[in-house]
Image (cartoon, rainbow, N blue to C red):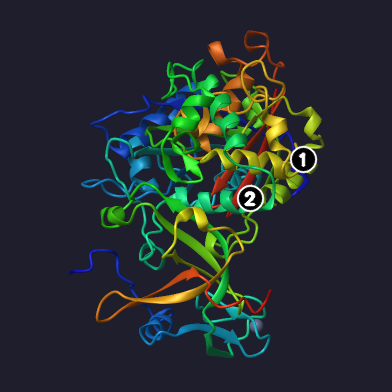
Amino acid sequence: MTYRKPLPQPNADTKPFWDGCKQHQLRFQKCRDCQYVRWPPSIICPRCHSQDTEWIVASGRGRVYTFAVYHQAFHESFREDLPYITAIIELEEGPHLLSNIVGCNPREVKCDMPVEVVWEDITEEFTLPKFRIATQPDVNS
Amino acid sequence: MSMNLKDKYAIVGIGYTEQGRVPNRTALSFYVEACANAIKDAGLKKEDIDGLICYRYFQPARGEREVTPYVTAQCLGLSPKYLSQEANCARSHLYHALGVLEAGLCSYVVIAYADNALSSQRLIDDIDPDKAVFGQIGYPAEYAMAAQRAMYTFRTGPETWKEIAVGQRKWANLNPKAYFHNRPLTYEDYYNSKWVVEPFRVPDCCLISDGGRAYVVTSVERARDLRRPPVVIMGIGQHNPSSYIDQSTWMAGPSGAKIAGEIAFKMAGITLDDIDACEIYDCFTYTVELTLQDYGFFRPGEGLDWFKDGTIAPGGRLPVNTSGGLLAEAYFMGMTPLTEAVMQLMGRCGDRQLGARTGTREPEIILCSDNGATFQTHCCTILRRF
Ligand SMILES: [Zn+2]
């Protein structure tokens, strides 16, 4: 079946992230000077303005910072998913990433709940990082 | 911005258009009409206007080109010394106007916002591909996320927000220009309304409107000779946390309202007790709660008790959004609250006029807010009767 939803549009800043997703790796930039892990990608560290940057692979574990439950479709292609959950995930490494929480009833989701990444290969070219309620014990608790 | 701006500048005219659902009109036509009406309302001639700021954010409707300040000036027959387009929700347009007035570059500045968003039926304004792939489209979810985090952080939720929706609807029912005039809202109606993006129901969300709004700013000195009693800017402050919602850590407060409010109150030299009414940017009910909370009217989680029993409604001790606001009158960005404050202070509000008519305090000082994107920008403006 053809994938009808919007597709990622990688640009010079975000291409390494989407390339990582294709390999089921959650990649973020890390500042080599102050160790700050940032998202979205940028030419400099917003904390110290260093350009000395490396890409790290995140664990894929985090917590629900906040979420919302769509009951109306703002784009036709998401109508079949209603109600669906969008969420901001606070990853263990620090960055906040917008994604979906899947595989559960919206009533089960709470702020600060531990979650882990699951990969959805949506097309030949693209994979989306989504999250589910954690099945592994939360190492931080 | 320096403290010597206090009481130096005033709003002297307001331009309305037909509003609500007004089909077969371009956005440009509303800009031009609102500006012309504001100039006329102030008792000025178009030749007097030497500054024009067109606020623009949403994409033009199909078949219409972008409403640039050029084309608005052209249609108004203006060739101003200062021409600017305020865009992407920065809400700095009044700062810009005060800046060029204070610098002596301009004498009379018109600020306008208009759109035909309701009748042109644009569903999606701008899609950020990194969000759209997850179905995160439109502002309701962005604010719903903020509201959800607030529900986790302090005591709030639909129980609090219903007071805002119902209170503002009562004001709308006194305003013949309001979209929801003659359409009351009860607590029961509120709870029976459909979810849009949970935790928001339909009455938690602002209107989409056709129409426009404009106002004229000048010095208090020049204002003395004009047609209307001027409404004086006592204080103004802005703060821009700037980061998008997915990187925000202030979505449950304090938002930009805290610092913006402190700057404005310091400039005005007054306290919260001096405020007779508030006109608060109300894209969503929760925005009203967080803004008033960050200004210091109540502490986090005390909103429910504070709003209860019609505090903000006609007859209440602190009227809020007396036109019905963005929730129930019309959506013209921060123009809806600011122009309503001006109309109230000029005493031109008919059945909804603050004072004896609505069982509220005679308005001397009104606090206004404007807020852009998802709590990324905040502008606080304190206005007083001349
Ligand atoms: Zn750094």
**Chain of the residue under label 1:** B
Does the residue tagged 1 have its C-beta within 8 Å of any atom of ligand 1? no
Q: Quadrant of residue B353?
A: top right
Dot 2: within a 10 Å radius of its alpha carbon, few (fewer than 14), some, or many (20 or more) residues?
Answer: many
Do the residues bearing badges 2 and 1 touch, measured as CB atoms within 8 Å? no
Comparing B27 with A28, the one in front is A28
Query: Residue B300 at what x, y percent from top left?
Result: 73, 45
Most foreground residue, B63 or B327 = B327
Mark 2 vs ligand 1: CB under 8 Å?
Answer: no
Q: Amino acid at mark 2?
A: Ala
Q: As shown in the figure, which amino acid type bears the numbered disc 1? A: Phe
Q: Which mark is residue B150?
A: 2
Q: Among all residues in the image, which is located at the extreme top?
A: B357
- Which image quadrant shows ligand 1? bottom right
**Quarter of image, res B131:** bottom left
- Residue sitting at 59 percent across and 90 percent down? A52
2 vs 1, front mark: 2
Q: Measured along the vertical axis of the image, is residue A100 above or below residue B310?
A: below
Are there few (<14), some (14-19), or many (20+) residues within 10 Å of tag 1?
Answer: many
> From mark 2 to mark 1, how far is it between C-alphas?
26 Å
Is B140 positioned to the left or the right of B234 in the image? left
Quarter location, residue B171:
top right
Q: Is residue B58 visible?
A: yes
Side of B102 relative to B55 (left or right)? right
Q: Is residue B246 above or below residue B358?
A: below
Secondary element at image label 2: helix
Q: Regarding mark 1 in the picture, which secondary structure is present there?
A: helix
What residue is disc 1 on?
A: B265
Q: Position of residue A141 (x, y in %)?
A: 69, 74
